[in-house]
Image (cartoon, rainbow, N blue to C red):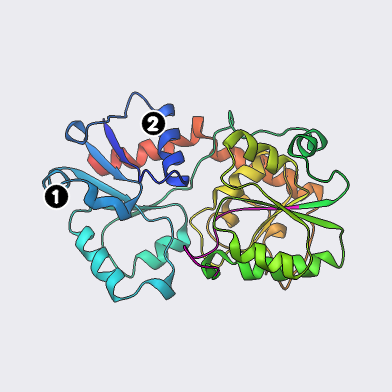
Amino acid sequence: MKVFVLAPRENWICDRIAEEWIRNNPEVNTNDPLEADLIWLLAGWCWNHLHPKILASKKVLVTVHHIVPEKFNEQSKRDFLARDQFVDCYHTPNHKTAKILRQFTDKPIFSVCYWYDAKQWFPEDKISCRKELNIPEDKFIVGSFQRDTEGGTTNPKLEKGPDLLCEFLKKLQSEKDIHVLLGGWRREYVIGRLESENIEYDFFERASLNKLRKMYNACDLYVVSSRYEGGPQAILEAACMNVPIISRDVGIARDVLSPYCLLDIPDQVCIPKQEWTDYNFEKVKLYEISSHKNSYLEMFKRIIK
């Protein structure tokens, strides 16, 4: 079995997922779509980067990471149907996305959670990480490492919940001496809100993976405030590094996190107990790539049989 993975080449999360898959599965990977038994459109929006004749001659799997119903307009439907004619099966990382996707296609849908790589994401000493990052050692550090402002604007990307995050931070500020640690890019909306509320922060834009690992490990709390998600990867990454995390009930949160860590952010303000974080640390091991990759290989085999 040979699989060709199409990545978007955007220097963002899908490229990292593709690179991790290729590195951990050299025996099934091919860089030539003509040699492939299966073409995996990991970045489905880039499907037309391949010639239609190639797509028509191969088994094609598309990953739909998440769907924002409010943004799925008539043009989105036309684009979806244009690609759907070449698609044999769909993959979603969670059942919520699969349920929405089912409204638009009768093709088979597989729900298989993302993975994480334990060689990259592992616990480190909190104080040492804070010193290396030059952030306060005596503050309550709250992390958020995602893209949540619409491109070229200061408008919130509402599906990522930056407005909910800021409301949560306002409430938490009354209970804790907080310092916010931001990562990713397109954080203009959150930065503007934090400055208007006089909430201290540091922003490391597009940090390297090694630096990002230290950012996670520096945190007392990581917050996922999204309204819609595919993952996010942050749930896996925080959990496997023993970082306390809370999340709205989106994406893979229910599959990985303790039920007590699923909150109605910003209405609920809660700091996870150590036993909840320990639960997350044990549960997330199911999704380490060295073993969880078999779930993907089984999915691929079912498609090409």
Q: Amino acid at mark 2?
A: Ile
From the image, tell me which residue sits under label 2.
22
Quarter of the image with the C terminus is top left
Secondary structure that dominates the magenta span: loop
> Few, some or many C-alpha atoms within 10 Å of disc 2 (few <14, some 14-19, many ≥20)?
some
Q: Position of residue 293 (x, y in %)?
A: 44, 35
From the image, tell me which residue sits under label 1.
52
Find residue 84 and report its image quarter. bottom left
Task: Identify which residue is drawn at 28% across, 48% down.
Answer: 61
Question: Regarding mark 1 in the picture, which secondary structure is present there?
Answer: helix
Asked if residue 88 shows in the view, the reply is no
Q: Position of residue 257 (x, y in %)?
A: 65, 52
Query: In front: 65, or 294?
Result: 65
* Disc on res. 12: none
Q: Magenta includes 58?
A: no
Query: In front: 109, or 64?
Result: 64
Left or right: 305, with 53 as reference point = right
Question: Regarding mark 2 in the picture, which secondary structure is present there?
Answer: helix
> Few, some or many C-alpha atoms within 10 Å of disc 1 (few <14, some 14-19, many ≥20)?
few
Per the model, the C-alpha gap separating discs 2 and 1 is 24 Å
Residue 100, above or below 39: below
Residue 152, above or below 7: below
Q: Position of residue 167 (x, y in %)?
A: 71, 71
Mark 2 or mark 1, which has the lower sequence index? 2
**Magenta-tinted stretch:** 142-154
Task: Identify which residue is drawn at 17% across, 47% down.
Answer: 55
Task: Identify which residue is drawn at 59% across, 56% down.
Answer: 253
Asked if residue 56 shows in the view, the reply is yes
Q: Magenta includes 149?
A: yes
Task: Identify which residue is drawn at 55% across, 64% down.
Answer: 160
